[in-house]
């Protein structure tokens, strides 16, 4: 059973930008289900926002930088933080917050699969956390080389075992 939930980059500019993420509504529903189960278990919820430099599309405070309005996050209760790199740990105090909350096992969901999801899963393991990847609660957009569905499938397969426990979102349980 997991101790905490980490949601990555579910922001307006990524979720509802010109290139729509693969199965975005289904993924949003899966993430909101994770949030509801984490809340019911009183497990902490951490929410990362990718933050770009001044003048960039994801500049802090801009409309695209905001969390998607249908994401069931409560800024008064959940732990929102900003990051500037694909890793949710680099340049943030996330590791300290997780240790303070006595988190041993972390569920990861959100965007973008091949960047922030992949990097954060790998770094979390290097930092000593057990990671559950909600295999159907992360997504990305098509690239010129690969369709988003193939990117998600590839990362689910690649990360499973050595880095994460791969679990369907509906089967994730929190302590």
Image: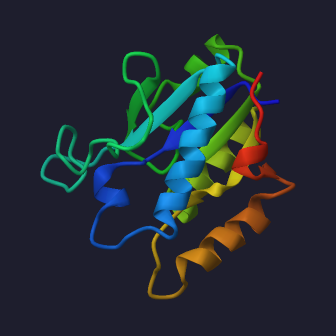
The residue at 60%/76% (across/down) is: 149
Left/right placement of residue 109 relative to residue 132 reads: left
Image quadrant where residue 26 sits: bottom right
Relative side of 94 to 135, left or right: left
Residue at 52% of width from left, 68% of height from top? Answer: 23
Q: Tell me which residue sits at (75%, 32%) in the image.
A: 129
Q: Does residue 38 appear left or right of residue 17 in this picture?
A: right
Quarter-of-image position of residue 16: bottom left
Quarter of the figure that contains the C terminus:
top right
162 in relation to 46, above or below: below
- Split into 4 quadrants, where in the image is the N terminus? top right
Front position in the image: 6 or 128: 6
In terms of image quadrants, where is residue 155?
bottom right
Query: Which residue is rendered at x = 20% and y = 56% of the image?
Result: 57
Hey, which residue is sitting farthest right in the picture?
161
Judged from this view, the residue extending furthest toward the left is: 55
Q: Position of residue 137 (x, y in %)?
A: 61, 53
**Looking at the image, is 154 positioned above or below residue 170?**
below
Residue 9 picture location, percent across and down: 43, 47
Q: Residue 118's spot in the image, x, y percent?
A: 62, 56
């Amino acid at each position: 059973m997991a101790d905490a939930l980490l949601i990555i980059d579910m922001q307006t500019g990524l979720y509802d930008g010109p290139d729509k993420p693969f199965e975005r509504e289904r993924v949003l529903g899966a993430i909101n289900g994770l949030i509801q189960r984490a809340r019911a278990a009183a497990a902490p919820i951490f929410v990362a926002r990718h933050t770009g430099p001044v003048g960039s599309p994801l500049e802090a405070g801009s409309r695209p930088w905001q969390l998607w309005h249908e994401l069931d996050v409560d800024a008064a209760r959940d732990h929102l933080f900003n990051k500037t790199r694909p890793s949710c740990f680099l340049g943030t105090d996330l590791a300290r917050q997780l240790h303070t909350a006595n988190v041993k096992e972390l569920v990861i969901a959100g965007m973008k699969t091949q960047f922030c999801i992949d990097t954060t899963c790998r770094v979390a393991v290097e930092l000593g956390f057990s990671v559950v990847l909600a295999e159907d609660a992360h997504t990305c957009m098509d690239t010129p080389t690969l369709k988003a569905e193939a990117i998600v499938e590839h990362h689910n397969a690649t990360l499973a075992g050595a880095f994460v426990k791969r679990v369907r979102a509906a089967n994730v349980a929190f302590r």
